[in-house]
Structures are given as C-alpha cells and as structure tokens.
Amino acid sequence: MLNDKKIISAIINRDEQMLAFVVQKYSKLLWKIAASILVNAASVQDVEECVADVFIHLWQYPEKYDSDKGRLSAWLSVIARSKATDRYRQIIRKRELPIEEIIAESPVYAEIATTDAECEKLLSCIGELDGIEKELITRRYYYEQKPAEIAVVLDIPKKQVENKLYYVRQKLKKRMENQEGEVSHEKI
C-alpha cells in the first residue's frame, strides 16, 4: 500500500509514474481550491496553470514535504492556496481599476451614491480606508464575492470577513455623514 512517505521517496528518486499517480489522485482537490480563490478573477486556463504549478513545485522540491507536519494532500492544498492567491494578486494588479471606475460600474455603489456629489464623497471616504478595508469592499461589492470566498482568499475566518465588512460599511456611512456635516457647516 502506498503512503505519503513512499510517494515522496519515489518522487525524490524521479519516478515519473508516481508523479502521474499524484496528479491523477489530487487534481480535483487542488482544482477546487484554486478555482475557489480565482473565481470571478481568472480564466479556466489560469486555474489549470495554478494546479500545474503545484505539481511542478512537488517535482522540484519533494524534500520540502514533512510527513510529521501533515498529510501530502494537506501540504499540496496549502501550496495550491498560496499559488492561487499569488496568481489572483497578479491578475488584480494587472487590471486594477481606478476607484472611480469601480463606483461607476458597481450597482451597489450606484444605489449608495445617486448623485455626482455623493459619488465624490463615497470616493473620498473609500480612499481613506486602509488596504484590507479597501480590498474587502472591492471584493464584496465590485467583484461580488461572497464572504466565504473572500475568507478563503484572505485566509481568515468567514465570520471575521462578515464582521469586518459590517464595520467598514458603518465606517463609510459615518465618514459620509461627517463629510455632509462639514459641507453644511462650511456653507453657513
């Protein structure tokens, strides 16, 4: 019977049939992990390349697997999550939109800000958010990712994503109200 140590030992000894066995055995699992992170951001080809990168990593660095720390499937899953997250960031960086375009294209933002002045206020308030807050808002309301999907990508619990989104929305609402108060006060 094959166990993880035997599989890794065979791959260290450059047994291509063993690698083919691992590819066949774990492809579906790794595909699900990569696809869950790359959803709404990448093509099927990007997901395939990400999964292939995991197997290339296994072939190049089989000695990095430590059976005392967990199963081979868990180790490959961690690599898949890492590679998919890296690829997601690359894709987003390449097509990063100015916040103005996000507001213009998002139906959620359109509901919040119905006038140009409100769009300006919202834009200003979003600009004041820190990096993680902006990422949460963008993923949730522009890419329309569910909190569970965001949790996988950011590697934080779903409940924490939901809580952060709630607090960021409250923060934006309060900032918009404060800006409204400042504008009214300036007119007086």
Image (cartoon, grey):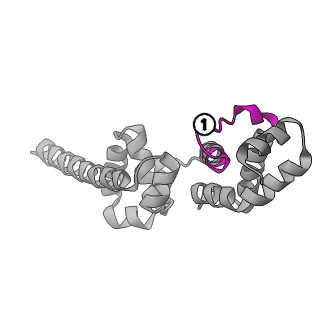
Q: Quadrant of the N terminus?
A: bottom right
Residue 120, how many percent across, how many down? Answer: 35, 50
Residue in the image at 81% along x and 35% along y: 60
**Crowd band around label 1 with a 10 angstrom C-alpha radius: few (<14), some (14–19), many (20+):** few
Considering depth in this image, is 53 or 27 the residue closer to the camera? 27
Considering depth in this image, is 95 or 88 the residue closer to the camera? 88
Left or right of 6? Residue 15 is right
Q: Amino acid at mark 1?
A: Asp
**Which region of the structure is painted magenta?**
60-77
Left or right of 11? Residue 135 is left
Q: Is residue 43 above or below residue 86?
A: below
Q: Is residue 31 above or below residue 96?
A: below
Q: Residue furthest left?
A: 188
Q: Quadrant of the C terminus?
A: top left
Residue 112, how many percent across, how many down? Answer: 32, 63
Asked whether residue 30 appears in the rendered view, the answer is: yes
Residue 103, how many percent across, how many down? Answer: 44, 57
Asked whether residue 141 appears in the rendered view, the answer is: no
Residue in the image at 50% along x and 53% along y: 152
Q: In terms of image quadrants, where is residue 25?
A: bottom right
Q: Which residue is mark 1?
A: 68
Q: Is residue 44 magenta?
A: no
- Which secondary structure lies at badge 1? loop
